[in-house]
Image (tube, rainbow, N blue to C red):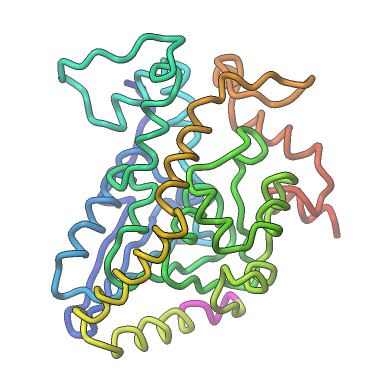
Amino acid sequence: MTETAQPDPEEALLYAKDPDTKIATITLNRPEQLNAPTIGMRLRYAHLLDLANVDDDVKVLVVRGSGDDFGSGADLPELAALMAESPEAALREELQLAGEDVAYPPRRTYRGSGATLGYWYSDARSGCRTLQDFKKISIVEAKGYCYGWHFYQAADADLVIASDDALFGHPAFRYVGWGPRMWAWAMTMGIRRFQEMVFTGRPFTAKEMHECSFVNSVVPRDSLEDEVAKYATACSLSRPTDAVVMQKSFFQVMKQFQGEYMGSIMSAMLESMGGAVKPDGEDLMLGRDVYDSGLGRAVKVNDDQFPPGFRLSKSGRDKAE
């Protein structure tokens, strides 16, 4: 287990509900770390969604972030520290195996090289595709960065309300090549636009995501909370909660007919085969040397190679002006 200090999940992931309106809110509360969820936060997130699924006081769930951004993806320092230790360390944290008599699959095997962890990300318990199985109405409030894990949540939500400065994408397209929710993104954005995102790695603006039907509404930053409240209130006043669950069941069947869960499993298979990728030259490859030298720095150096308008960081993109 890494000795890196981690936040208390209950303080870093806030939950509140109003029984009168039946609107609940999950707030990612690590603004200084761009609301990056740790493993503990993701597990708490999955648990909160399970509770809200059952709770008769909840009909609509809003997911938002503190500060300037919804979030830039998973906690890279935590990931780097665990992976520098071993893939087994990451899995034991994810599955809470500390103290359990469980033998990790051997190294240089499909399961030991990443499949066990990759398939965990396609499981609702991991907090990566949990919102996909949520049976009530979910709304994501997107602002600033909406990358990585946060992009998963936007894809899986029923509605996405964004500020006009929001950026959507997944850094892993640049330094891994795929992500766990690719099928859902392609279904929502349309394959042609999603292929552009994957092959260039560039982030899309809120306006672009609205044009390809990923975002429902785009408003100025200072109007975002009011816009979200308007949508949440309208949803809470609509049909009874039982009717909402019936409606969600219809959409879930439709998504499964389109292969949503199969796509999640296929993405996990891709995640598990990263070791088979051979670099063409000086490509960024996530190996022990990168984790030891600093993953954050390596990602920034890689980002700086791209045209300013294609960069992931706000500061890098500002150089295009």
Depicted 153 relative to depicted 5: above or below: below
Look at the image and tell me in which quarter the N terminus lies: top left
Image quadrant in which you'd find residue 48:
bottom left
Q: Residue at x 27, y 71 (%)?
A: 24
Q: Residue at x 57, y 68 (%)?
A: 214
Image quadrant in which you'd find residue 52:
bottom left
Q: Position of residue 261 (x, y in %)?
A: 40, 50
Q: Position of residue 97 (x, y in %)?
A: 22, 25
Q: Position of residue 179 (x, y in %)?
A: 53, 42
76 with respect to 98 (left or right): right
Depicted 278 relative to depicted 231: above or below: above
Image quadrant in which you'd find residue 132:
bottom left
Q: Position of residue 106 (x, y in %)?
A: 36, 9
The magenta-colored residue range is 221-225
Q: Residue at x 38, y 65 (%)?
A: 63
Residue 187 within the segment the image draws in magenta: no
Comparing 175 with 272, the one in front is: 272
Comparing 283 with 252, the one in front is: 252
